[in-house]
Image (spheres, rainbow, N blue to C red):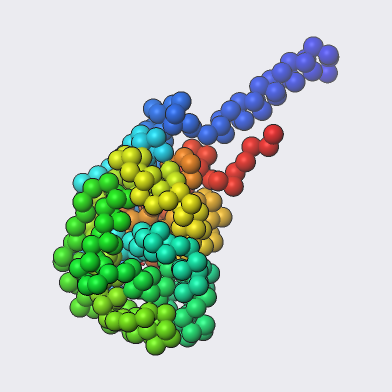
Amino acid sequence: MSARIRNIVVVVAAAFVCGAAAAKTPVDPARDPKAVQTTVEAAYAKYRGLQEGKNADYIPALAKVDPNVYGIALITVDGKVFTAGDLATEVSIQSISKVFTMARVIEDQGPAAIAENMGVDATGQVFNSIVAIEHYRGSEMNAMVNPGEITSTSMVTGGSYDEIWGKILGIHNNFAGRSLSVLEDVYKSEAETNQRNQAIGRLMFAYGHIKDNPDRATDIYTRQCSIGVNVKDLATMAATLANGGKNPVTGKQVIGADNVPEVLAVMATAGLYDDSGKWLYRTGLPAKSGVGGGIIAVAPGKFGIAVISPPLDAAGNSVRAQNAIADISNALGGNPYSITPR
Ligand code: GLU
C-alpha cells in the first residue's frame, strides 16, 4: 500500500471511529430538547404494537382496564416535560405508592426507622410472600414488598384513620403536584379480595413489626394502592426524586434532599419485584412498578420518567414500560453508573 493510500485509509477509519463515538453521545435535554421529544416518540412508536404480557387479574378491577392504554412522560429536573401517547387515562398507582408512603415515614422518623423495622434487603421471594415473613420473622425484607409496606403504612402516625390517610394522600399529592383521588371501583374490588394481604398484616403484627390495628393498616394500604394517576403524575413524582425531593413543576420541597438516597436505594434493591437485578443491570435506574401497569424510574440529577401500559410480564412488570424506559434512558445517558473516563 502506498503511503498516500495508507493515509487516506487512516483518515477514513478515524472519521468512522469518531462518528461511532459521536453517535453514542447522550441526548442532552438542556441542549437539544427536540431530540429528547424525538427519542420519546420513537420509543412510543416502537412498542405500541407489542402484544406481550397480560393485565393483572387477581384484583378483578385490573383485568377490566383497557390493555391498549399506553403513555410515556419524561420530566427533567428543571421542569421540562416530554410526552407521547395517552396522557389522560388514570390507572391505580398500586405498588408505586409504596415508594411515597415509605418516603413519608423516612421523612418523619428518619431512615433508620425503616431499616430497623422491616429491613432494606431483597427477599428473593414474590412481593406478597408469606414464606419471606416466616424466614426472618418479618425482618430482613423491605418496604417495596407487601409485608414491609403494610408495616410502613402502619408507621404513619395519626389519631384516626382519616388523619393517617390524609398524610398518605398528602405526600402523594405533593409528589404529583396536584390533588389525586382514589379510584373507588379499584379500592372496592381489592378490598373484597385482599384476604392474603390481611393475613400478611396480621403476621407482621404477630411478629411485632406492626404495633397495633393490622387490619386498619392493610385497609389504608389497599386505599393508597387505589389512588388514580396519569402518566404525567407518575413522571412528576419520579422527577421530584430525581431533583433531590423538590418537585420541579411546583417548586415545592416535598421531602428533605438528605432522605432521597435511602428512598432510591430501596427502589434499586427491590423496585421491580423478582426482576429488580435484571432491571438494574439493564438500566442502572432506581425504579418501581405496580400491577396497575405503571413504572416510574429515576435518573438522579437528570430526569424522572414514567410509562403506563397494563399488560405485565411473568414477574409483574409492564412489558412496554420496561422497554420504553430502557430505550429512552439509555439514549439520554440516564444510567448513573455509566461514567465517561477522564
Ligand atoms: N395492591 C396490590 C397488592 O397488594 C399491589 C401489588 C403491586 O402493585 O405490586 O397486591
Name the side, left or right, on which 341 lies relative to 137: right
Q: Residue at x 42, y 80 (%)?
A: 209
Q: Is residue 180 visible?
A: yes
Q: Quadrant of residue 80?
A: top left
**Which image quadrant: the C terminus?**
top right
Residue 321 percent across, percent down from the top left: 38, 52
Q: Residue at x 42, y 84 (%)?
A: 208
Point out the residue furthest to the right here. 2
Q: Residue at x 62, y 41 (%)?
A: 339
Name the side, left or right, on which 272 lies relative to 282: left
Is 170 rendered above or below residue 215? above
**Which image quadrant: the N terminus?**
top right
Residue 240 percent across, percent down from the top left: 38, 46
Could you say which is closer to the camera, residue 292 or residue 219?
A: 219
Could you say which is closer to the camera, residue 263 or residue 109?
A: 109
Is 308 rendered above or below residue 166? above
Residue 299 percent across, percent down from the top left: 47, 45
Residue 41 percent across, percent down from the top left: 35, 37
Could you say which is closer to the camera, residue 57 or residue 189?
A: 189
Point out the residue furthest to the front here. 159
Q: In which quarter of the image is residue 319?
A: bottom left
Point out the residue furthest to the bottom here. 206
Q: Can residue 272 be seen in this view?
A: no
Number of residue marks: 0
Could you say which is closer to the camera, residue 113 or residue 225?
A: 113
Is 209 rendered above or below residue 105? below
Name the side, left or right, on which 166 lies relative to 305: left
Q: Residue at x 16, y 66 (%)?
A: 185
